């Protein structure tokens, strides 16, 4: 007897430990599946980002190869031509003392030098045969050039001269610009989602957009993203002069704004190629915020544009779900038939009015399900739920008996549903209101 009393708690503890281990194993399995799903999604985005980075460096290597050697030959030709112009003007000035002729010779000399498109520093280096003009098409500058092409900033501090490089530039930009814009838009959407999640966590409540507060909510989100954009520029403009010593704080703010809005006038460009990586990271992050701000402004403009309009043709609206495009009509039909609604009943519902009421926060009226709906459903599609109905609870005024064929009776019995009846059309017409809706029978 005492042994029996001891064994009962022991068995209970064993059962509890078994349940605990099963629960822990189930939780671990769910956590692993969730982590694997997140990892699968993240790998696709990371692959896109890595491909864009490789695309930038590959383009920079091609630009460096096409323009690097050509730049050396170009400098040699410019040096020779500039020295010939110098000797020619010195010889002409030595043969005359007329002030007008001297001014004319100097004017022609300066015009010819200007046509070479060389800087004063390069001209002074040309006068020293032992000095070499520094190349502009280095690999870091080629990376910066590729980056400005894909982001459409286009500083213009370096430009291609060979025909081969110009052709490659057009092909490179035709594929690279849409690719980079898609990547930045993807990052911008993640940034917006992260910002909204942070706001939700700080406020400790769900951000529900009621119909009367929708516009104010969108404007508040725009102000939040715009504030982050301004703070980012203010902080970044204080950091950039640490390596770009020639820039003042105002110049840095001007450079940041021109770069992040992709205006890129080119009057101020990055000079320190050894600090090119942090500069490009700063511009890329700023483009994320710019895209998020533009997307948020687009939501506000879309809300203003469609303000006061009624929803029409709900079934014809197309949406994207799970990476696939489908119509609302197909989605509604699939969900309704999943719960056993017949096609006849689906088509009789005023879906435009239903969606409008849902957007306004109104609860739709309760939809009665009658026996003939199940009968019509069974004749076309097998049910996905238990459709068993208590025949004693059915109101005989809404259906009448109609004998089914042996095949249909066998199929109905296999589905655990009654072999019942066809509805009289006048009864169904009597139930629906003028708009094709069922009245609220709960009222």
Image: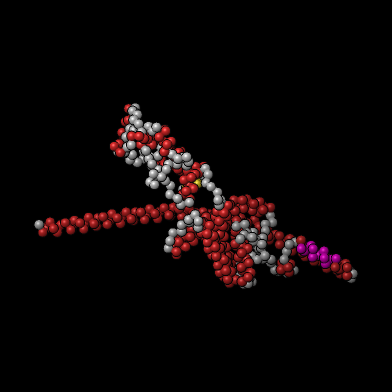
Relative horizontal placement of residue 389, taking residue 326 as reference (left or right):
left
Residue plotted at (35% across, 31% down): 400
Q: Toward which corner of the image does residue 150 lie, by quadrant? A: bottom right
Nearest to the observer: residue 84 or residue 332: 332
**Is 402 included in the stretch rendered in magenta?**
no
Residue 371 or 377: which is nearer the viewer?
371
- Residue shown at 61% from the left, 60% from the top: 261
* In this picture, residue 330 sits left or right of residue 162: left
Quadrant of residue 259 in the image? bottom right
Judged by its main secondary structure, the magenta piece is helix
**Quadrant of residue 294 in the image?**
bottom right
- Height in image: 32 above or below 430? below
Expressed as whole percent of the image width and height from the top left, the position of residue 179 reads: 56, 52
Q: Which residues are magenta?
A: 104-114
Indicate the position of residue 50 as horizontal and vertical percent values.
Answer: 51, 56
Query: Is residue 188 shown to the viewer in this render?
Result: no
Asked which colour scheme the image uses, the reply is secondary structure
The N terminus: image quadrant:
bottom left
Q: Can residue 209 be seen in the rendering of this structure? A: yes
């Amino acid at each position: 007897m005492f042994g029996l009393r001891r064994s009962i708690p022991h068995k209970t503890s064993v059962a509890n430990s078994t349940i605990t281990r099963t629960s822990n194993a189930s939780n671990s399995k769910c956590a692993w599946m969730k982590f694997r799903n997140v990892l699968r999604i993240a790998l696709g985005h990371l692959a896109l980002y890595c491909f864009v980075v490789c695309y930038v460096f590959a383009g920079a290597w091609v630009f460096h190869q096409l323009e690097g050697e050509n730049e050396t030959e170009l400098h040699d030709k410019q040096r020779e031509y500039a020295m010939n112009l110098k000797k020619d003007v010195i010889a002409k000035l030595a043969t005359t003392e007329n002030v007008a002729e001297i001014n004319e010779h100097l004017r022609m000399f300066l015009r010819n030098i200007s046509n070479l498109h060389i800087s004063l520093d390069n001209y002074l280096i040309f006068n020293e045969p032992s000095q070499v003009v520094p190349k502009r098409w280095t690999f870091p500058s080629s990376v910066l050039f590729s980056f400005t092409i894909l982001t459409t900033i286009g500083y213009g501090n370096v430009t291609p001269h060979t025909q081969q490089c110009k052709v490659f530039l057009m092909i490179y930009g035709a594929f690279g610009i849409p690719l980079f814009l898609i990547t930045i838009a993807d990052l911008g959407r993640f940034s917006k989602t992260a910002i909204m999640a942070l706001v939700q966590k700080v406020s400790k409540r769900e951000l529900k957009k009621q119909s009367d507060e929708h516009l104010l909510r969108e404007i508040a989100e725009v102000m939040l993203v715009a504030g982050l954009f301004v703070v980012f520029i203010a902080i970044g403009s204080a950091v950039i002069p640490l390596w770009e010593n020639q820039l003042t704080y105002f110049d840095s703010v001007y450079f940041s704004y021109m770069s992040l809005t992709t205006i890129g006038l080119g009057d101020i460009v990055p000079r320190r190629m050894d600090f090119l990586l942090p500069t490009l990271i700063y511009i890329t992050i700023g483009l994320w915020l710019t895209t998020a701000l533009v997307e948020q402004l687009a939501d506000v403009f879309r809300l203003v544009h469609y303000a006061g309009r009624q929803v029409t043709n709900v079934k014809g609206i197309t949406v994207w779900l799970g990476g696939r495009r489908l119509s609302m009509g197909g989605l509604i039909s699939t969900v309704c038939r999943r719960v056993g609604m017949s096609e006849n009943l689906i088509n009789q519902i005023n879906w435009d009015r239903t969606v409008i009421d849902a957007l306004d926060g109104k609860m739709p009226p309760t939809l009665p399900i009658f026996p003939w709906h199940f009968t019509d459903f069974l004749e076309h599609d097998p049910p996905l739920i238990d459709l068993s109905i208590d025949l004693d609870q059915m109101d005989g005024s809404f259906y009448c008996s109609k004998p089914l064929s042996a095949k249909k009776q066998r199929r109905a019995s296999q589905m655990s549903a009654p072999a019942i009846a066809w509805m009289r059309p006048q009864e169904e017409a009597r139930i629906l209101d003028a708009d094709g809706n069922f009245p609220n029978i709960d009222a």
